[in-house]
Image (cartoon, rainbow, N blue to C red):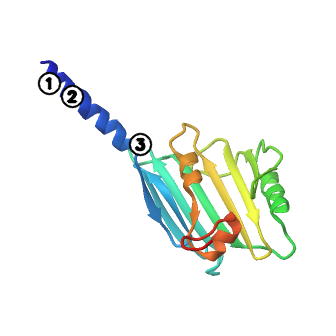
Amino acid sequence: MIRFCSFLLVLALLALTNQAIAKERVFSEFSLDLPQDWDGSERTGISSRDQNEYMLFLGKKDAEEENYVAYLSIYLLPNKPGKDAEQSARALASQQAEASEPVEEGPFWVFTGNPRDTILKGQAKTLVTANKDDLLIIIVKDPASQGAEGILKSLKATDERSARLLKQSLPGQP
């Protein structure tokens, strides 16, 4: 009986461990560690037919696969002439309910607020960075801590455009 209970305990621990394992997923602009039960899709030309408009959407749905319980969306867009990351962050914050003042954190301007989306209600963290050519916006909404912050920490650039914004070197480069 003791052996059987020990066996069941080991199986339960393995099942819990497997749920926490994240696998690296590589997309056209970014790679990241995506936990089990999360999925992702990317597309270009999100508001026009401009192929320089890029979106990566990562989400986790509930057990019924009907509603999102967490998501992380990444937008890589052409920047408007003369606009910097702070200006863009302030403009985005002004469009959200209960938004905090954007503050500089590393390469990003960061604020919290309630975006007007129908995917998942509640507070989100928005990160914004820019250079003269491109604007990067990352929106993280994970009210029950389903792994979005870990995904964000694992975010890596896979091409020069995203590497410049994230202030990262590409693999094989100094």
Residue 47 shows up from this direction:
no
Quick one: SS at disc 2?
Answer: helix
Q: Residue furthest right?
A: 82
Residues under labels 3 and 2: Cα distance?
A: 19 Å
User: Relative to the observer, which residue lies in front, 115 or 21?
Assistant: 21
Residue located 40% across and 49% down the image: 36
Q: Which residue is mark 3?
A: 20
Q: Is residue 134 left or right of residue 168?
A: right
Q: Which residue is mark 1?
A: 4
Residue 53 location, x and y as percent?
64, 74
Q: Which residue is mark 2?
A: 8
User: Relative to the observer, which residue lies in front, 169 or 66?
Assistant: 169
Disc ID at residue 50: none
Residue 174 location, x and y as percent?
63, 71
Picture quadrant of residue 162: bottom right
Q: Residue furthest front?
A: 174
- Say which label, 3 or 1, has the lower sequence index: 1
